[in-house]
Amino acid sequence: MLENIPTQSTMTELLGPSLFEVWQKLCSAIDEKYEMEHIWNDGGKKWTYEYKYRRGGKTLCCLYAKRNCVGFMVIFGKEERAKFEEIRGVLSNTVCRQYDEANTYHDGKWVMFEPIDTAEFEDYMKLLAIKRKPNRK
């Protein structure tokens, strides 16, 4: 876990003002539907920061930040992949393509999105609902 959680100005400087706004809106959209723990981590080799949404030891999704780039990752287990196929028809082509091109590992399919605006947020919420029903009304 990160000791020094990045400030708004650090994040704005890292992402740029328009992507920081996308980051904030995505966090708000998730927070509106889910009561979760928020965990900041080092972003590893590829990213500067990781911001994880967890509850009861299970990760819902992770946001990632690096210079001028936001990442939004959802990992789908076997049953969740079947549920994805059930709702594929209501998702955008872009979201489906990202899903189809994502690598599948022993623990699931790791799908990374790199949003540049809020256009796919509705789809992201549908993806999160596959993993866990929203626990906020």
Image: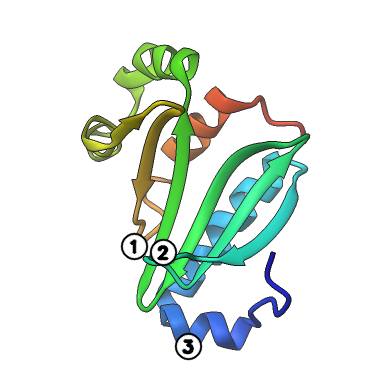
Q: Is residue 45 above or below residue 90?
A: below
Location of mark 1 (residue): 116
Q: CA distance from mark 2 to mark 3?
A: 13 Å
Residue drawn 21% across the image and 36% down it: 101
| Residue 63, image x, y percentages | 51, 56
Secondary structure, mark 2, is strand
Residue drawn 48% across the image and 61% down it: 64
Q: Is 45 situated left or right of 92 in this image? A: right
Secondary structure, mark 3, is helix
Q: Is residue 7 above or below residue 66?
A: below
Q: Give the number of the mark in front: 3 or 1.
A: 3
* Mark closer to the chain start, 2 or 3: 3
Which dot marks residue 70? 2
Residue type, numbered disc 1: Ile
Quarter of image, res 111: top left
Residue drawn 34% across the image and 56% down it: 114
| Residue 39, image x, y percentages | 69, 58
Q: Is residue 24 above or below residue 29?
A: below
